[in-house]
């Protein structure tokens, strides 16, 4: 019997002996995903823009000895990767068909590009041509930023009556509502209009601070302003 087999048999015997004696064997901690790590592990900073800010502020030296979680498979420092585009693709996706969702978003970007190039060539003066944005990703960022609400209404029950109480909204919730409203406005279309065309129109309208989604955000802000008398219920 070689040494490897002897060590394996000895380990199994020790394990069985501990189980028979009733010893508590600590479970093996497996770091399968990002949520399995302890709290003192920091999230990875893989974007070059964020790393540049840390270098300028001098905080990079503080994070040199801090344990860091491994990045996920979709996290990359490539210049072609945009977290907002990836989030929109995930919201568009249904039944796990991510390739179809990605192709729909890419066709929407293509329609935006065609529309903006046509407007660029029809612009009479160079000043107006310079104002026309040709990058679909920048238009997406502007559209989402213009659609993000600043307040929200929360139902709070007091004395048997439910009040719609205005309050601040988190950044994550605001981003979710902006993307959701854009997709709701896109799906509310005629059957003759395909998804990429309607989504491109909604993004262009929202980037210009117009359209149904911007109106929906403004209506929500008006309701919050009208219900500001109930704001004190948040602390009661």
Image (cartoon, helix red, strand yellow):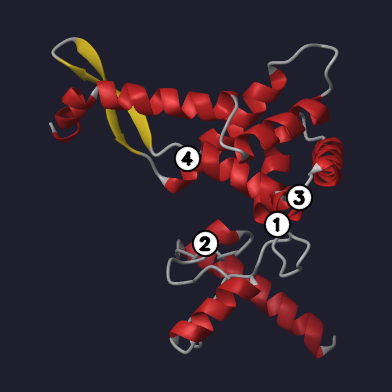
**Mark 4: which secondary structure?**
helix
Q: Give how far apart the Cα atoms at labels 3 and 4 are.
A: 38 Å
Q: Earlier in the sequence, mark 4 or mark 1?
A: 1
Q: Name the residue under label 3.
A: 125
Distance, label 1 to label 3, CA atoms, is: 33 Å
N-term-proximal mark, 2 vs 3:
2
Q: Which residue lies at the image location 59% right of the left edge and 69% below the top edge? A: 15
Residue 93 appears at what percent x and percent y?
75, 34
In the rendered view, does 129 fall on the left or right side of 107?
left
Query: Are discs 2 and 3 less than 8 Å apart at CB?
Result: no
Counting from the top left corner in percent of width and height, residue 170 is at 40, 44
Q: As drawn, is 113 to the left or to the right of 214?
A: right
Residue that numbered label 2 is attached to:
20
| Quadrant showing the C terminus | top left
Q: In which quarter of the image is residue 161?
A: top left
Quadrant of the frame with the N terminus: bottom right
Residue that appears at 17% across and 24% down: 229
The image position of residue 20, as x and y in percent, is 52, 62
Q: Nearer the viewer, mark 3 or mark 4?
A: 3
Residue at 67%, 71% in the rendered image: 12
For label 4, the residue is: 174
Residue drawn at x 34%, y 21% is 223
């Amino acid at each position: 019997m070689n040494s490897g087999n002897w060590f394996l048999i000895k380990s199994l015997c020790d394990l069985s002996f501990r189980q028979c004696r009733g010893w508590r064997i600590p479970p093996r901690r497996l770091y399968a995903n990002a949520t399995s790590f302890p709290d003192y592990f920091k999230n990875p900073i893989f974007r070059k823009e964020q790393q540049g800010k840390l270098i300028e502020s001098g905080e990079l030296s503080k994070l040199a000895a801090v344990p860091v979680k491994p990045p996920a498979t979709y996290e990359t420092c490539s210049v072609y990767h945009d977290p907002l585009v990836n989030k929109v693709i995930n919201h568009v996706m249904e039944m796990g068909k991510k390739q179809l969702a990605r192709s729909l978003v890419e066709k929407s970007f293509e329609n935006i590009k065609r529309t903006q190039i046509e407007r660029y060539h029809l612009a009479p003066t160079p000043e107006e041509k310079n104002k026309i944005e040709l990058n679909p990703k920048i238009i997406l960022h502007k559209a989402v930023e213009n659609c993000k609400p600043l307040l929200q209404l929360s139902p709070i029950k007091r004395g048997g009556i439910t009040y719609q109480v205005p309050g601040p909204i988190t950044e994550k919730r605001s981003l979710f509502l902006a993307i959701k409203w854009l997709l709701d406005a896109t799906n509310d279309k005629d059957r003759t209009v395909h998804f990429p065309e309607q989504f491109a129109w909604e993004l262009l309208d929202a980037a210009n601070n117009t359209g149904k989604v911007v109106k929906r955000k403004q209506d929500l802000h008006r309701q919050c302003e009208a219900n500001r008398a109930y704001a004190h219920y948040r602390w009661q």
